[in-house]
Amino acid sequence: MISIKMTSKMLLASLLLGSTQAFVPAAFRLSRTTPLYSTVEDEVSARTGKPTGTSFLPEETVERAKKGNPTEKAKIAKDPSSAWVDIYEYARKIREGEMTWEEVEKADLDTRLKYVGMLHRNKRTPGQFMMRMKVPNGIVNSDQMRFFSKCVEPYGDEMGVIDITTRQNIQLRGVKIEDAADIIDGLHARNLTSIQSALDSVRNMVGSPLAGIDDQELVDTREICNALNDLVSFDPVTETRGNPQWANLPRKFNIAVSGSRDDYAHTHINDIGLQPCPHAETGEMGFNVVLGGYMSIKRVAHSVESNMWVKADRNSVVTLAEAILRIFRDESERKDRQKARLMWLVEKYGVEEFREAVVKEVESYDRGVKIEAHQPAPTDTFERRELLGVHKQPQEGKVRVGVLVPTGRLSKKECNEIADLADKYSEGEVRFTVEQNVILPNVDEDKVDELLAEPCVNGDSRLKINAGFIEGNVVSCTGAQFCGLALIETKLNAENIGKKLEELVSVDRPIRIHWTGCPNSCGQVQVADIGLMGGPARKEIDGKMKAVPGVKIFVGGKIGEESHLALEPYKSGVPLAEEELLPVLVEILKKEFGATDK
């Protein structure tokens, strides 16, 4: 890789990335009717050429942050937006031998570098990072897939892997600081970014993986997800990635945009969930808004109805999101990070009072956006459709093909194989699902047999098109291989157990089995049919009861229109060892899901 030495102006040039508005019809573009920066007195950083994230905070919020938790104090001491420049300087110095990664300032290493998507995994892989992207609506192309593979190539087969996440996103494993600058530049050259993808930022925009190719689509989520992504990570003043207006939130923030009644985006576990619904009187398409869904070690919360409905156009959705984000940024908790999620603020206000605050904020922007009351959702029976396998599209002669990527983990070879399939069959387009799998859209119907016969989806390959009802629905967090919080290894165990269960029993419908290594529930076990969470267990060994890795098991979570969170464990303290865990899971499958022996 090439060493880069950058000034602040050069940095802005390197970050330059055409807004997705350039690729959107004019009718969908957001007209700007309010100042882009709040006052002429904004504190502009000499390092980035932009106002600092802290400069957007009211004085009262700054004072609370100064007395807040260690993360807040670190952000006050040195603005998070400094990372947009610092990563280049650190990369240069390490390359040129002026310093080592151990000499990086601790607050940068553990906190601020997360604002360029760099998360240090010190307990498991000292000096190497997970690097998170922003992939709005989970849509990439074959060139981007090959770039992901190339980025992790220097780190070997075990460390250098690519993960598809439960937010339709990509995470690169094993990245070193000295390589980060070139990766960021490569992302920007490919209309992607890693900036503002981690810590206290708005995370990846989740949308429908069937956007534009669905005969039951209510809203095409692609343009809306791109617009929201621009809102939170594109600076309209400098036209570069990194929006300082949202560079100092109190906590992470998740937004999901559903495009159909299937709710492939899982709106009920997001801070803002947009559920498509026509207006009862006018028939115009819009979104019912749900708020506050999230999962953490302290609390798991289903979203609440906000009694808000907005039109499903770019201006209305972006304005609503901006209003909620402004209130959240300035008013949410800065001391207790476990109480700094949106749900706590909504509860502090009261749902109706929070709605009033949002309406007032939206009206202050004077963009012609009207928030109406919740609209009645359909009540007839609807069956959520499957994403894996071959399915017809509304486009004549076209099909979509869902490909299983077990636990979302891709080797470099597999990443390139998917890119090759995309070039050959789906015009280079690849889509990710929140179930950590891949969809190839717009495949010619007369080429399906050829695709099904491809070696990379047959034989001993991990990638499959016609996966079973159990193995095809396994989701997993990162696990103990890379994450220092995980109590168990999840990826490998989830894949192996899924295969074994597929061999042992038959079920008549997809059974979603989620794995998470710790109570933070990044693997979303509470939404699963069967969820396994890492935890303590005891087992008799040599006549004595000894502590062993184990799991809590949750049963009965639901997704879609009848979403439900399974909050209480069905069983606890089950040893992770295959000979102990498999019989328990088989029993649950038989008792709760009608499984039969093969």
Image: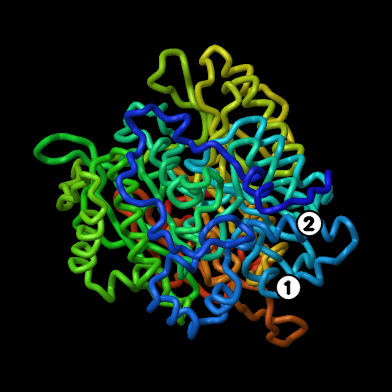
Q: What element carries label 1?
A: loop
Which residue in the rendered view is the most extreme toward the bottom? 544
Residue denoted by label 2: 91
Task: Tell me if residue 407 comes above or below residue 118 in the rendering.
Answer: above
Viewed as shown, does residue 580 lie left or right of 565?
A: right
Task: Let me know if residue 261 appears in the view.
Answer: yes
Q: Distance between the residues labelled 2 and 1?
A: 13 Å
Q: Is residue 598 visible?
A: no
Label 2 amino acid?
Ala
Q: Which residue is pictured at 62% across the width and 26% down the height? A: 422
Q: What residue type is labelled 1?
A: Glu
Query: Label 2: how many residues lie within 10 Å, few (<14), some (14-19) or many (20+)?
Result: many
Looking at the picture, tell me which residue is in the foreground, 287 or 384. 287
526 horizontally vs 416: left or right: left
Residue topped by disc 1: 105
Measuring from the top left, give residue 260's x and y in whole percent: 33, 38
Which of 67 and 215 lies nearest the eye of the viewer? 67
Q: In which quarter of the image is the N terminus?
A: top right
Q: Which residue is drawn at 20% across and 60% down?
A: 360
